[in-house]
Image: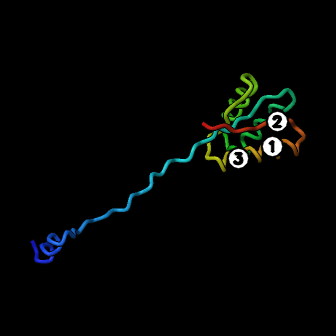
């Protein structure tokens, strides 16, 4: 033991290494963006929305459109809150411009 360490020990002073606690970082929740079925929006319009807003290939967009048509709703994608909110707003804006009652919503995944 060095002389400095002995002096500190005798005086009740100890050298301690203190590590700052790191905060736990959680991943943000994800949200599903859904299209809801209605009796008025053309199927082709829904496919176009899925291609343009969600970047789907034609085949996948058609599958999702048929899911919306037969099951009442279909998942367009899963995103963080801000992106999901933006996608919903885009779909609703395009549908309104084309005077279609298509509904798009999001729910926590």
Count neighbours of disc 1 (C-alpha within 10 A) and say few if under 14, some if 14 to 19, many if 20 or more: some
Left or right for 36, reference 97: left
The answer to whether 10 is drawn above or below residue 85 in the figure is below
| Residue mark closest to the camera, 2 vs 3 | 3
Label tally: 3
Residue 15 in which image quadrant: bottom left
Which residue lies under the disc numbered 1? Answer: 92
**Callouts 1 and 2 close, C-beta under 8 Å:** yes
Which residue lies under the disc numbered 3? Answer: 85
The answer to whether 69 is drawn above or below residue 89 in the figure is above
Q: Secondary structure at mark 3?
A: helix
> Residue farthest to the right?
99
Residue at image point 66% right, 49% down = 83
**Residue 16 or residue 101, whichever sits in front:** 16
Residue at image point 76% right, 31% down = 36
Task: Report x, y in % for residue 25.
Answer: 48, 51
**Residue 106 or residue 51, whichever sits in front:** 106
Task: Report x, y in % for residue 9.
Answer: 15, 69
Q: Secondary structure at mark 1?
A: helix
Task: Give the CA distance from mark 1 to mark 2.
Answer: 7 Å
Task: Report x, y in % for residue 24.
Answer: 45, 51
Image quarter of the C terminus: top right
Residue 17 in which image quadrant: bottom left
Residue at image point 68% right, 29% down = 63
**Residue 80 or residue 2, whichever sits in front:** 2
Q: Which mark is residue 102?
A: 2
> Residue farthest to the top?
70
Residue at image point 76% right, 25% down = 69
């Amino acid at each position: 033991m060095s002389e400095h360490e002995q002096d500190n020990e005798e005086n009740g002073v100890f050298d301690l290494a203190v590590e700052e606690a790191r905060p736990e970082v959680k991943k943000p929740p994800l949200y599903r963006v859904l299209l809801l079925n209605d009796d008025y929006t053309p199927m082709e319009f829904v496919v176009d929305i899925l291609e343009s807003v969600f970047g789907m290939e034609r085949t996948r967009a058609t599958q999702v459109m048929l899911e919306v048509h037969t099951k009442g709703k279909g998942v367009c994608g899963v995103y963080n809150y801000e992106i999901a909110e933006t996608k919903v707003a885009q779909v609703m804006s395009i549908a309104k411009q084309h005077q279609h009652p298509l509904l798009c919503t999001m729910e926590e995944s």
